[in-house]
């Protein structure tokens, strides 16, 4: 039995008890499945900073999305390190999440082992955040969208806090710089601070001191009173 088949089985088993899973409780099977898909144990991308693990609040919202979509579970395991061959596979699951407003899964894919998938996921998450500002739907009325934005913002800030902002090299450094830019643009929009990426679409990258100050402001918005 191939590893990708095992991942599918684990995923389906994790979802089979979805009615018993609360948003505050992530099943061990689901947690293991997500880690198996996002983390490359072969160190294939050794020349990039190792992505951080998905946090429990992201996993809880993500688990809820998987409980509501069988197609998502099948698409997601296709981007596991063993099965991942080209960016189109990543784009397929990202496009599906974008169409169905599955933003927690997009948030988790921001720490996929492949750097191009990470960037594509962040770009899609940003688009969903912009769309969310323009519509009055069930998610807005029941507070789900506010919660999703807060959870995504806190996770992106943690990535910024625990990931080097610059790396050596040429092509790799350029790709990583774009990753940092996408994180910062998401944080600007999700917090409403617009420090580096304003509503007029003008963009600029700050120096290390400016980025540090921006992280303090993002933190204040995402963790009010702390």
Image (spheres, grey):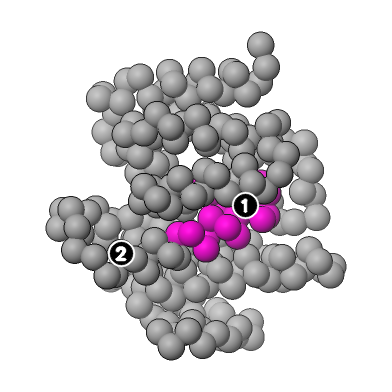
SS category of the residue bearing label 1:
helix
Residue under the point 84% across and 70% down: 170
Q: Is residue 163 left or right of residue 30?
A: right
Of residue 118 and residue 99, the one placed in the foreground of this image is 99
Residue under the point 32% across and 20% down: 17
Residue that badge 2 annotates: 132
> Does residue 115 belong to the magenta stretch?
yes
Q: In this view, does 13 lie above or below 66?
A: above
Residue 128: x percent and y percent? Answer: 39, 61
Location of the N terminus by quadrant is: top right
Give the Cα separation between the discs numbered 2 and 1: 22 Å
The stretch in magenta equals 108-125
SS category of the residue bearing label 2:
helix
Q: Is residue 210 left or right of residue 167?
A: left
Residue that badge 1 annotates: 117
Residue 206: x percent and y percent? Answer: 60, 85
């Amino acid at each position: 039995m191939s590893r990708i088949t095992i991942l599918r089985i684990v995923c389906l088993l994790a979802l089979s008890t979805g009615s018993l899973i609360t948003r505050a409780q992530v099943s061990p099977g689901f947690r293991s499945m997500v880690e198996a898909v996002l983390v490359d144990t072969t160190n294939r991308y050794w020349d990039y900073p190792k992505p951080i693990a998905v946090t429990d609040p992201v996993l809880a919202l993500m688990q809820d999305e998987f409980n509501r979509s069988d197609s998502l579970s099948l698409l997601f395991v296709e981007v596991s390190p063993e099965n991942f061959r080209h960016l189109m596979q990543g784009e397929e699951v990202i496009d599906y999440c974008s169409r169905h407003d599955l933003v927690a899964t997009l948030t988790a894919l921001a720490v996929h082992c492949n750097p191009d998938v990470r960037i594509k996921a962040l770009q899609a998450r940003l688009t969903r955040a912009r769309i969310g500002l323009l519509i009055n739907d069930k998610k807005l009325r029941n507070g789900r969208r506010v919660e999703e934005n807060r959870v995504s913002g806190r996770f992106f800030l943690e990535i910024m806090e625990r990931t080097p902002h610059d790396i050596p090299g040429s092509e790799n450094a350029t790709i990583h710089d774009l990753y940092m830019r996408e994180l910062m643009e998401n944080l600007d929009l999700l917090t409403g601070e617009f420090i580096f990426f304003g509503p007029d679409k003008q963009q600029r990258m700050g120096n290390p001191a400016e980025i540090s100050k921006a992280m303090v402001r993002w933190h204040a918005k995402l963790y009010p009173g702390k």
